[in-house]
Image: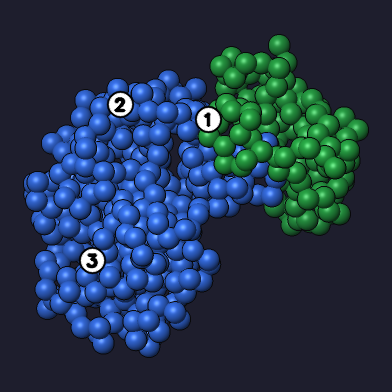
Amino acid sequence: MSDYTKPLPTLNDENRPFWDACRAGRLSLQKCAACAHVRYPISAVCPRCLSTEFNWADMSGRGTVFSYIVFHQAYHPGFKGELPYNVALVQLEEGPRMFSNIVGTPNSEVRVGDAVQAVFDPVTPEVTIPRFRLAR
Amino acid sequence: MNTTVNPLRDKCAIVGVGASAQGKVPGSTAMSLVVDAFKAALDDSGLRKDDIDGILTLPGQTTPEGALNFLRVGETLGINPRFTGTMNMGGSTAGALVQQAVLAVNAGMASHVACLFGDAAATGGGKFDRAQGWGDSSSIWGYMSAAANSAITASRHMALYGTTSRQLAEIAVACRYHASLNPKAVMQKPITVEDHQASRWIVEPLHLLDCCLVSDGGVCIIVSSAERARDLKQPRVLIRGMGQAYTTQNLGTEDWWYAPHQKRAVNDAYAMAGVGPKDIQVAQLYDNFTPSVMLWLEHGGFCKPGEVGGFVENGRIQLGGELPVNTAGGNLSESFMEGWLHIVEGVNQMRGQCGARQVAGAELGLVTGRGQALNCANALVLRKG
């Protein structure tokens, strides 16, 4: 029984390849087999061309901080002990954007535009969460 | 020059507005608040219950979906409508329903449409769905709450344009000043920029005083044809322009944080009305959080993109300023009715019934709404008939 109390993904056939890749230390997203559009969040259909054919493609893990906020209020009990904690909207080099956390740097020292690199945080035997550290 | 006039311009009027008690209304339910609001709007309009042949509802945000479903509302009010429906576009629903009513009245499908909302969010035991992130995954990283979406907007606007928290404070201060002139407002004690700065962080860069209230309340807005409005009780308030726009792509869209669809909604309303931002004398701009007003001022063309920080300073958006905004206090200080009271205030300003907070000589007003995170937007241009 894990003592991890924050929200976890519900693994299913659609999202399992994403989480399996994270467990192996890779950030992998869906790339449309018809138009090559890289998409996220995970979806059965390409929002650009409506093709349902895709491949899981490894990303570079490189990105920049597109926007950045710090929570001083917990909206889920699992985060109470961690206040204040940050959330960044990360612009990935390959196009998509994802919410994540910046680790290894005090909250007050992260700036919009900072270059970041994905790192992988195993929180349960099944789930490894991708986060980012500053790349400088 | 294109001289084609939208045939719906000035063809409908808001003939009745009504609200229940606001704030903390112990013992109330979404339905009891809707009933109070409906009675008040009927009385305001001079219509009888049996005149109402259209019902449009927002189901309430903290009650189970369907709590204010049109069937239940119709059953409770004893009305068998010719035209009805229930939609949830969050804070953009009020304006979207009024626009739906305009389409129905113009199509001859209804004569008098009541748009209704009620929610016992403060005392009713309901909760906004705070534990859920947008999409199925963002809560994994702790991205939760409505405040977070506006914080993302503010943080990037600050980084790109140098907008400051003290400038966001000017919006909260203006809303509270206006609420202090509104005897029905929930929060009437004036605040200063320093009060805003001293209030606790919620989601940085947003302080507590950047955030809307949580309120019990109900609101009803009745739409009729402009012709029928001539014979009713109140001075006519015409719906001169209207527009809606949406983004569905969220994070993947380059400008999601900036909600560019808000500009499309306002521009459509301006085009239909044949007016521009310079013609607008008073504006009710949706304010779930202060950054929403910031975006509406830029997208409404009142200042250039990126320049809103300077625009809101020096009392420019307060009564007596260049563009009085949220003259009843808005979601931030009057009551969090998800934009429904913005329309009520827009109507009351055109009627000249706002007492100490009346904008003298106001004949053209803008009302905007947005909801479902940043994704739904609408705008109405109202004109004194």
Give the distance between the C-alpha atoms of the residues marked 3 and 1, in whole angstroms.
Answer: 39 Å
Q: Give the colour in which the image draws chain B.
A: blue
Q: Is residue B11 above or below residue B82?
A: above
Q: Quadrant of the C terminus of chain A?
A: top right
Disc 2 to disc 3, C-alpha distance: 34 Å
Residue at image x 37%, y 46%? B213
For badge 1, the amino acid type reads His
Q: Which residue is pictured at 81% across the width and 34% down the height?
A: A123
> Residue B187 at x, y = what percent?
26, 43
Q: Which residue is mark 3?
A: B17
SS of the residue at dot 2? Answer: helix
Q: Chain of mark 2?
A: B
Q: Position of residue B163 (x, y in %)?
A: 40, 24
Q: Is there any visible trace of residue A4 in the rendered image?
A: yes
Give the residue at mark 1: A72
Q: Amino acid at mark 2?
A: Asp
Color encoding of the figure: by chain
Colour in which chain A is drawn: green
Left or right of A119, for residue B224: left
- Whether residues under marks 2 and 3 lie with C-beta atoms below 8 angstroms apart, the answer is no
* Mark 2–mark 1 distance (CA, rounded to whole Å): 18 Å
Image quarter in which the N terminus of chain A is found? top right
Count of labels in the image:
3
Identify the chain of the residue marked 3, using the numbered disc in the image. Answer: B
Is residue A13 shown above or below A40? below
Report if the CB atoms under discs 3 and 1 are less than 8 Å apart. no
Q: Marks 2 and 1: same chain?
A: no
Q: Earlier in the sequence, mark 2 or mark 3?
A: 3
- As shown in the figure, which amino acid type bears the numbered disc 3? Val
Residue B5 visible in the displayed image: no
Quickly name the residue at label 2.
B195
